[in-house]
Image (tube, rainbow, N blue to C red):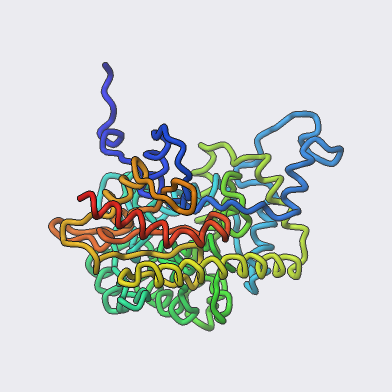
């Protein structure tokens, strides 16, 4: 038989998909709450729904059943929507260049190959702040690039502490990365970076002449009294030299509840980077034309209308975040649960309840493959993501994610309230079986 590439042979499912894949093989009819992946289950914005429901109307470009390629950069309307959304958060969009991509994932991949060194070398790696969204590691591996990282810590009070700025600088001096990735509304931790945090990290990027990539998939989803944080709110007055080195990752998936639409964008204030990124993406021809049309509807809303949508989204997720955290404190008080100040996630750490051999991935697999407990009258199980894959570790080093799991707030509020008790019962059942 022909040979499969070494890269393919080495691949394993992403931790955020692992539980879902394993659960799909079950034959029993157990009810499942899937919090393993941020697959938002809310309806899209009404303007987007209206276009989706009227694709063959007289005003639709698809009324005759013809679906053509768009320009590689994306339609003007879809790019206008991206910049309009950024502006609605109080950012100055003058001098910004937008390119539509196949979801935020394609924008991430373009950012990686546009910033990092040559494929197959350790040259100019990508600098991450662990725990870091797993797809940055997966996409650098796919493209033959490398990642390095600095680490934050989940403290016993449920708060993540950012790495010391000296550690960030030391990592830059040692590894000579091409870019620093920051996720201000963080996935997986639920941590919210302040504007001051972003300014300090931007200053380091300017000092060492590297790119700063801000993944703003969850912009506007924050649950504190802080103001909106964005790389596009950092000005030359804040950080001299910041202009021309900024990149942001945008997506329709989270704030706009359109995960399956697969529309994202790469935005930069560097014209040459933008032109070369579009040239690279010509191999993809274009992003989803129908998806761009649906998303483009947002270009015609007022900032006030967009702000009302953000407020509704925040209130919805704030309620879930509070109920999940309080539920874990009640049902599993010796576990550590992170309070989500932003995005859609909490991290549960059971390090105080297990021995040094315990692995979260085994518990996750158990829940997906055979775990089943009674909750009310129903047999139920729970899918969560093991956190080991969110960390970069040196050989022989203990992975902090070994005892950690990520929970996404993606089911209904009533079902999300069941998650802490369900987790506790499954955890007890699993520990009794060992």
* Number of marks present in the image shown: 0
Identify the residue at image location x=24%, y=53%: 432
Horizontal side of residue 257 vs 386, given as left or right? right
Percent position of residue 182, x then y = 43, 66
Towards the viewer: 203 or 413: 413
Position of the N terminus, as image quadrant, is: top left
Towards the viewer: 110 or 182: 182
Towards the viewer: 91 or 42: 42
Q: Is residue 4 above or below residue 132?
A: above
Q: Is residue 339 above or below residue 53?
A: below
Percent position of residue 369, x then y = 34, 40
Horizontal side of residue 154 vs 270, given as left or right? left
What is the quadrant of residue 256 in the picture?
bottom right
Which residue is most to the left?
A: 396
In this rendering, does residue 276 appear at all? no
In this rendering, does residue 137 appear at all? yes
Which residue is most to the front?
A: 377
Horizontal side of residue 384 vs 144, given as left or right? right
Which residue is most to the top?
A: 1
Percent position of residue 323, x then y = 51, 69
Horizontal side of residue 399 vs 48, given as left or right? left
Q: Is residue 278 above or below residue 284?
A: below
Identify the residue at image location x=25%, y=58%: 402
Percent position of residue 330, x then y = 41, 71
Towards the viewer: 88 or 365: 365
Which residue is most to the right?
A: 58
């Amino acid at each position: 038989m022909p040979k499969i590439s070494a890269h393919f042979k080495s691949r394993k499912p992403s931790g955020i998909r692992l539980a879902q894949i394993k659960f799909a093989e079950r034959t029993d009819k157990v009810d499942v709450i899937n919090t393993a992946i941020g697959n938002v289950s809310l309806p899209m914005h009404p303007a987007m729904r209206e276009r989706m429901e009227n694709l063959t109307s007289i005003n639709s470009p698809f009324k005759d059943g013809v679906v053509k390629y768009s320009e590689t950069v994306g339609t003007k309307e879809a790019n206008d929507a991206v910049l309009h959304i950024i502006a609605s958060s109080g950012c100055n969009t003058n001098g910004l260049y937008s390119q539509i991509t196949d979801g935020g994932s394609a924008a991430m991949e373009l950012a990686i190959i546009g910033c990092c060194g040559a494929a197959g070398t350790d040259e100019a790696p990508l600098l991450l702040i662990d725990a870091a969204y797993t797809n940055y590691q997966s996409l650098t591996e796919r493209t033959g690039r490398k990642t390095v990282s600095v680490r934050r810590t989940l403290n016993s009070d449920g708060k993540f502490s950012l790495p010391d700025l000296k550690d960030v600088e030391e990592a830059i001096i040692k590894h000579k990365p091409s870019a620093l990735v920051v996720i201000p509304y963080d996935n997986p931790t639920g941590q919210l970076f302040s504007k001051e945090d972003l300014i300090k990290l931007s200053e380091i990027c300017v000092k060492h002449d590297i790119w700063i990539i801000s993944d703003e998939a969850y912009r506007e989803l924050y649950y504190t009294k802080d103001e909106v944080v964005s790389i596009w709110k950092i000005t030359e007055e804040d950080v001299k030299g910041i202009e021309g080195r900024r990149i942001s990752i945008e997506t329709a998936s989270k704030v706009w509840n359109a995960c399956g639409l697969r529309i994202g964008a790469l935005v930069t204030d560097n014209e040459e980077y933008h032109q070369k990124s579009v040239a690279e993406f010509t191999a993809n021809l274009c992003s989803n034309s129908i998806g761009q049309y649906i998303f483009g509807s947002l270009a015609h809303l007022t900032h006030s209308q967009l702000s009302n949508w953000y407020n509704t989204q925040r209130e919805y997720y704030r309620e879930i975040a509070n109920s999940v955290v309080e539920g874990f404190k009640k049902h599993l008080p010796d576990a550590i649960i992170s309070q989500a100040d932003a995005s859609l996630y909490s991290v549960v750490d059971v390090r105080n309840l297990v021995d040094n051999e315990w692995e979260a991935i085994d518990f996750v697999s158990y829940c997906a493959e055979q775990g089943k407990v009674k909750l009310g009258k129903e047999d139920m199980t729970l899918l969560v993501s093991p956190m080991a894959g969110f960390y970069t570790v040196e050989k022989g080093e203990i992975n902090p994610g070994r005892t950690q799991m990520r929970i996404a707030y993606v089911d209904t509020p009533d079902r999300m309230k069941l998650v802490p008790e369900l987790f506790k019962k499954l955890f007890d059942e699993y520990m009794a079986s060992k």
